[in-house]
Image (cartoon, coloured by chain):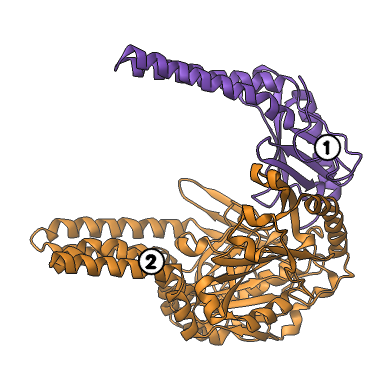
Amino acid sequence: MTNRLPSGPPGSPLATADMAGWHRLHPLSPLIRTGRHVVTIGILLVGVIFANRSQAGGDLVINLVVIAIVLAAGVVSWLVTRWQVADGVLRIDTGLIRRQLLRFPLSQVQAIDVVQTGLARVLGLAEIRLRMAGADSSGGRLACLRLADAEQLRERLLSMTRAPGTAAAGGQVALPGGQVALPGGQVALPGGQGTLPGGQGTLPGMAGRSGESVEIRGAERQLFRVRSRRLAGAIVLSRAGAYVAVVIAAMASVAVLTGQPGIVASFLPPAFGVVLAVWHQFNGEFGTVVAVAPEGLRLRSGLVQTTAETIRPGRVQAVRLVEPLLWRAFGWCRLEVDVAGPRQRRENQSEARRLRALIPVGSRAEADQMIGELLTAPPKPARRAPRNARWKAPLTYHFLGWDGDDRYVVASRGRVCRKTTWVPLHKVQSIRWVQGPLQRRLGLASVRLDVAGRRVTASIQDRDAAEANDVLRRLPEHARAARARAIDPVLADPPPGG
Amino acid sequence: MPVAEPGPPAEVGDDGIRWQHPSPRLLRARRIQVGLVTIPAALIGGLAGSTASAALGLGLGLGLVIAGLLWERFLARRVAAWGYAERHQDLMVRRGVLVRRLSVIPYGRMQFIDVTAGPVERSLGLATVRMHTAAAASDARIPGLDRAEAAKLRDQLAELGESLAAGL
């Protein structure tokens, strides 16, 4: 990697410890950004050539032209893209025809990820993704930088997001306004990690190594590591596994019934899609490691495409424990957290719909331990639903329950797939009371607690109307008190505290 | 307009809640909207049916008109079900007849507030105030407010939101 030219102005952008100037992305980034498409087109191309060799000539030319156009577009987009960090704001200017000047105030950042696609890993590059709070605006994306630079920039950005009012590392200007509601007790000193941000960028040789070795540093305590074999088993027993089974069964039965294995070929595109989805899930969750570090929860995962995420303390909006029917037989479960803002992976739709899994699959003991780290003394959904609810929800009645104290509310529901959701009261955005016609007849009502993000709602489902009214009367007051406490720096939860 | 008290029972939340209701003109706006949907639908349905036989066309047209009238009967209750109350720390909005809903939105959680008015609402001098929080699920809107009142409510809420704002 040493012979690769540094991007933009002379010297590695970060080695000079000067982020205030404008920088370019790495010159190889167009290749990485379009790599996925090029690979797809290449596969199609091979398919076409094999399918009909006689007519392949014309298609080949067309495909090559397409690849050339895609690459040229990538290069142009690289030429017009530049970025800068100054005054606590990350600025990205991009776009030739549709010029975009993006500003990301670092005080509003929810999480910063370092992502490496397979190709980027080979070339020692990485992408930085900023997650903002807005539910539908896209976050910032810097693709690609050298891995060491990306790591460093992340540290730097994180240290700037974390300490409003104090000067960030590298003599940057103090951040505007104390908008971040971080308890003062949690502000860990960035300097404590002992790595000089300026020092590392001068070792570009590091960039060629795999992400793991570079990232593990500083004071961090590992909480969880997924077992690969169990993950494979869990995926086989999940919905995706069921799809694969159905597709394989369909293909086999068609081949047997018609006696012509060639017909199976027409099934290949959907089969390919399903396999790809399963692969994405496996790839995304393989080797998940969760650790506590001063700047928050660190998540690393991935087999080919590796992701390193940092969830800042106090940014976890909700915790959800998912126990599908088949997994329950093995005592497995999944633990997810909701972080405000959209998932940034457009290319990876199947994963984009999920929450971030801290534990893709693990035992109850592991999940309980992790919950204990995330929440202090969380309640259990011990208050069962009233008998009347049996008529309204004959199946889910079994698991309906909730409980709450002055910090958290927990609610569980679902029969086939049991979901238990913990919501810290100081994260509650709005409270809704709902009563459908059937519920009214049975004297029931539900109360829902919404937290920031798209999908997470803790639903205190099918309670006695009187109880629901009581909850609705008292909960806003509790939530307000919890908010006031959370803004007060008095409440010093453990670092990853919800 | 008989203001029945559908929605959650009065004792929900504070006892001394003073519910405010949308303007009575909201009912007129909703009637116009129903008419705008029903009449063209009935005409098109009738014409399309009459290509097969006159009786079918008449039946289809009449059926659609009757459906529209039934819908209209239901409107008054739905409009009456809307209500909102400003409390010290939060705003309560309730709605719905069949499925009754009541939302509590703390002022500090409001991310932004917008005021919209469709063509029908605009012609009657009405507007809809919509509150957005960081949660996509919390849907709180108050339709059919007098335009001046909507603007006043918006400013009031924005001010309260600013003074009570809490981080995510």
Residue A342: mark: none
Which residue does the image show at 88% across and 38% down from the upper left? B17
Left or right of A485? Residue A213 is left
Q: Position of residue A97 (x, y in %)?
A: 45, 46
Q: Is residue A203 visible?
A: no
Residue nearer the viewer, B77 or B147? B77
- Looking at the image, is B104 positioned above or below residue A175? above
Left or right of A320? Residue A97 is left
- Say which amino acid is labelled 1: Ala
- Say which amino acid is labelled 2: Tyr
Residue at mark 1: B85
Residue at mark 2: A243
Which residue does the image show at 49% across and 80% down from the upper left? A231
Q: Position of residue A89 (x, y in %)?
A: 68, 59
Q: Position of residue A131 (x, y in %)?
A: 61, 62
Q: Which chain is purple?
A: B
- Give the spatial CA distance, label 2 vs label 1: 49 Å
Which residue does the image show at 87% across and 68% down from the upper left? A489
- Looking at the image, is A60 positioned above or below residue B71? below
